[in-house]
Amino acid sequence: MNGTVERESNKDRMRRILGKDGYARLFRSIDDAAGLPNEAYWNQEWFRMEQELVFRRSWVFAGARGELPEPGCMKPIDVAGTPVILVHGRDGVIRGFQNVCRHRGMQLVAEPCKKATLTCPYHKWAYGIDGKLRTRPHFDGPNQTGTFRDGGGERLDLIPVRVEEFFGCLFANVSGTAEPLADWMAPVLDQLEGYDLSSIRWAGKRDFEVKANWKLVYENYMEGYHVFSLHPRLLRFAPMDVRWSGEWRGSTFVNNYHFPKLEEGRGEGLPHFPDLSEENRMKGQWFLTMPHFAVEVYPDQFTVLVAYPEAPDRCREELHVFVVGEEAATGEKYAGPREDLINMWDDLNREDISVLAGLQQGRRCFGYDGGRLSPHWEGPTLAYAHKIIGLMADSEDYAP
Ligand code: FES
Ligand SMILES: [Fe+2]
């Protein structure tokens, strides 16, 4: 023994967890390939790799500016296992900080709220909403406040987390190393030429607890194959023969269809994007930008669905609905159609959730080997697995 321990590469680690055969089956042609093996949905080590190598290093959707409408509004959110606070600053910028006090490590904010300062519940260290430490009552002795004998200052300010905004959508990148958000989202913007995204306004959100691995949400999201079976209303709106599999363009999956007639929740009752082309007025489009930003765009909306991994067999979903113009988002005049729209998504998403727990449980059967994917519909599903593996393989070596 020479005392050196060989470091396992990310690729070898993935192969070991998934099994050599299961890993190899993923890379056959779609006619013969299988999906991800069960371990990708249940294994704790795999889950930690995804958090570390995919979510920490990517842009994660962190909510809507509309949830934090005024200076002082803040909300806690967990990003890739790191608790983060989003804070609307006095200058209008929404910033991110790790949700921890620099003294003894107390969580600072437990619920969305509005405050002038961030005061730690434990010994009342107080931080400005710009993250700067302001006061530490009694720290240097009884009744001594605001002295910084140890230098205090910057090294005790809240720890910043990178946050950027895309048309009212907030994104956080915990590692600080992701490419600029504008580059990340460029493929979505390319597809949405002719849509004035500066007109979108947040109309509300819904939360869902899902007893399934987060990838199952997106594998289901991409394929239109299940629509005839799970979504009777959606099928009437856009039948199977207007659908196709969609395709990946770089790190963004793109799918769309033309529908014959507007309906409530999709184009009817709410204002449309201004100056939309004839074609786009009867078009639905949806995207998935790696790893988890899914959005559906209709003439009257921009609806985001994101899943946050919580454990191998559990995730949390948020559905955020953006409509066109301030009046559509908040005006009394549109209260009815706005509610119809949000309810339509709520119903549709519950139809999907109805199979997710079963998909998770099915993956406890050792006889299931990743299954057989439909070459017509599920090529992008397989490519999604490749992309996740690609992100993990390309990252610096994982060192737990
Ligand atoms: S832990 Fe925050 S003030 Fe002591
Ligand atoms: Fe669905």
Image (cartoon, grey):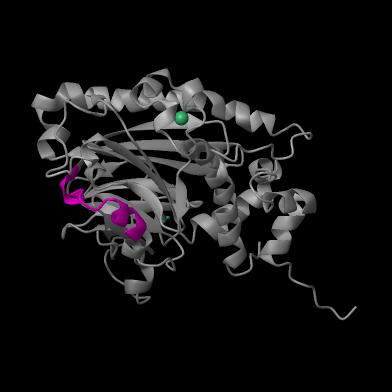
251 relative position to 281: left or right: right
Q: Is residue 390 visible?
A: yes
Residue farthest bottom in this picture: 2
Q: Is residue 199 magenta?
A: yes
For this rendering, which residue is in front, 142 or 387?
A: 387
| Residue 393 % position (x, y) | 62, 64
392 relative position to 329: left or right: right
- Give the quarter of the image for residue 244: top left
For this rendering, which residue is in front, 47 or 68?
A: 47
| Residue 250 % position (x, y) | 45, 59
| Residue 99 % position (x, y) | 40, 54
Q: Which stretch is magenta?
A: 185-200
For this rendering, which residue is in front, 136 or 244?
A: 244
276 versus 139 height, above or below: above
Quadrant of ligand 1 in image: bottom left
Q: Is residue 56 magenta?
A: no
Query: Which residue appears at 53% of the width and 38% of the height?
Result: 377
Query: Which residue appears at 44% of the width and 68% of the height?
Result: 177
